[in-house]
Image: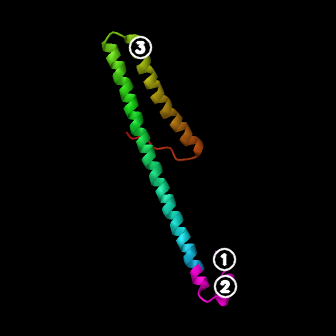
Amino acid sequence: MPHPSVLAGYDDVVPGSAERILRMAEKQLEHRIDTESLLAREQMRQATRGQHYALFICSLALVIAAGLAFSGHEVTASIIGGLDLIGLAAVFIAGRVFVRSSGEAEPEASE
């Protein structure tokens, strides 16, 4: 935004130009707010989609491990199930470390 004296100078040269400049700044601000809002909504949608995919993949791995265990392949089932659970734990631990290192408030654990 230009200084008020500069705006007055524009208005002296072209009557109504100060109002046009202010309107332009308001439109730019509105556009920026709309864009940031859209970006935030899309990031939330993408995070939710990723969580759904992760739930599906982990559930599928546990179902496969259970099927292998019931069919007599306990070692293979233990490896698949163990890697699945270790991977889940690693994601949650890495997520907490990332939240702490980025300076965001850590979500409180619900009891």
Q: Quadrant of residue 54?
A: top left
Q: Say few, some or many: other residues with alpha carbon within 10 Å of mark 2 (under 14 / 14 to 19 / 20 or more).
A: some
Q: Say few, some or many: other residues with alpha carbon within 10 Å of mark 3 (under 14 / 14 to 19 / 20 or more).
A: some
- SS label for mark 1: loop
Q: Residue at x 46, y 22 (%)?
A: 83
Which amino acid type corresponds to the residue marked 3 in the rendered image? Answer: Thr
**Nearer the observer, 71 or 85:** 71
Which amino acid type corresponds to the residue marked 1 in the rendered image? Answer: Pro
Dot placed on the residue nearer the N-terminal end, 2 or 3: 2
Residue 76, placed above or below residue 101: above
Q: Is 49 situated left or right of 2 in this image?
A: left
Compute the Cα span from label 2 to label 3.
Answer: 77 Å
Dot placed on the residue nearer the N-terminal end, 1 or 3: 1
Q: Mark 3 points at which residue?
A: 76
Q: Name the residue under label 1.
A: 2
Q: Where is residue 17 in the image (x, y as percent from the top left)?
A: 61, 84
Which amino acid type corresponds to the residue marked 2 in the rendered image? Answer: Tyr
Q: Do the residues labelled 1 and 2 touch (CB within 8 Å)?
A: yes
Compute the Cα span from label 1 to label 2.
Answer: 10 Å
What segment carries the magenta color?
A: 1-20
Which residue extends farthest top? 72
* Magenta part, dominant SS: helix
Compute the Cα span from label 1 to label 3.
Answer: 70 Å
Q: Quadrant of residue 78?
A: top left
- SS label for mark 3: helix
- SS label for mark 2: helix
Residue 55, placed above or below residue 12: above
Which residue extends farthest front? 14
Q: Does the magenta stretch include residue 15?
A: yes
Q: Name the residue under label 2.
A: 10
Q: Say few, some or many: other residues with alpha carbon within 10 Å of mark 1 (under 14 / 14 to 19 / 20 or more).
A: few
